[in-house]
Amino acid sequence: MKYLNFKNGNKMPSIGLGTWKSDKGEVGKAVKIAIKNGYRHIDCAAVYGNEAEIGEALSEVLKEGIIKREDLWITSKLWNNAHKSEDVIPALKQTLKDLQLDYLDLYLIHWPVAFKPDVANPEKDEDFLSLEEAPIIDTWNKMLEAKKEGLTRHVGVSNFSATKLKDLLSKTEDGPEVNQVELHPYLQQNSLIEFCSKNGIHLTAYSPLGSGDRVDAMKAADEPSLLENKVIQKIANKHGASPAQVLINWNTLRGTAVIPKSTNEGRIIENMESTGVNLDEEDLKQIASLDEHFRYVTGEFFVTKGNSYSDIYDEQ
């Protein structure tokens, strides 16, 4: 297992279990299967609606003595309706209560988007808070305060472009330690990786397998499949591996963490075994040619007529 190293000596395992879209009644079992098969990194978020069940699973494996708390890396994320200064720490404490933990290893601002406190998902312009009403730097300062209080060991962001990172870094001497973004061969984001590397920011790749189990409303017509890509399949056959293992290994070779999601025991185990795949220079060259700058998670679900978040990724 590879690790991403932090300044204070802490290490984040490069392969984690994603829990986005993991249904209630399944996610707890998946977490226990993962931990029993070598996973030490579990990625969560309040908005996924399954942290209480994950908390039960974590409590069970800790009580059974399968693993010690200090050997686990647990990440969660601040949802968009808790960006106001007074809401950040209460939201984190609720996550800790749900996960049955005393602290997180990493807490992230989930999106550079703010909703009104009583809005879970926006439907109209009035559901949003402007960046003037909820400045990112104010939210960030509360994240840093939570770290000082010991509620989380590390803090970072998610879905932040280089432009948004630059803006945040210009306003604080204590910047994000991690940026979690969509990364895969169709969206390689080399310039963002370079920027984060230069600024000491680790990257975690989400949707590394193409997020084929997203709801239909989030899918584009005829979107490309990573797992069915002929180049990926050819490389997988060459190494006696699965396409998923190739995609996971590709991310770790680039120096990022990666959080494939599954609730299937066989796939959970298979994904961890991707550490045994050894991609060579020719493989990497072929994969590099696949970049289409294609996003599976477009952020369009935040777009309403006239709001200020019509281009989440600063790519207009």
Image (spheres, rainbow, N blue to C red):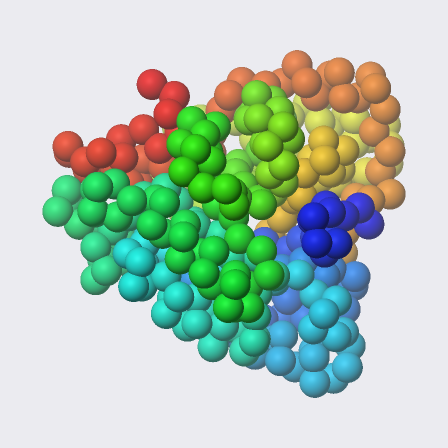
Q: Is residue 117 visible?
A: yes
Quarter in which the C terminus is drawn:
top left
Residue 241: quadrant of the picture: top right
Residue 102 versus residue 207 in the image, above or below? below
Point 21% across, 41% down: residue: 132
Q: Is residue 73 left or right of residue 225?
A: right
List x then y, in percent, for residue 292: 53, 18
Q: Nearer the viewer, residue 150 or 303?
A: 150
Point 36% across, 45% down: residue: 137
Residue 160 versus residue 55 in the image, above or below? above
Q: Is residue 172 left or right of residue 246?
A: left
List x then y, in percent, for residue 115: 25, 51
Residue farthest toward the bottom in the current orientation of the protein: 63
Point 31% across, 63% down: residue: 87
List x then y, in percent, for residue 192: 55, 26
Residue farthest toward the front in the current orientation of the protein: 173
Q: Is residue 19 visible?
A: no
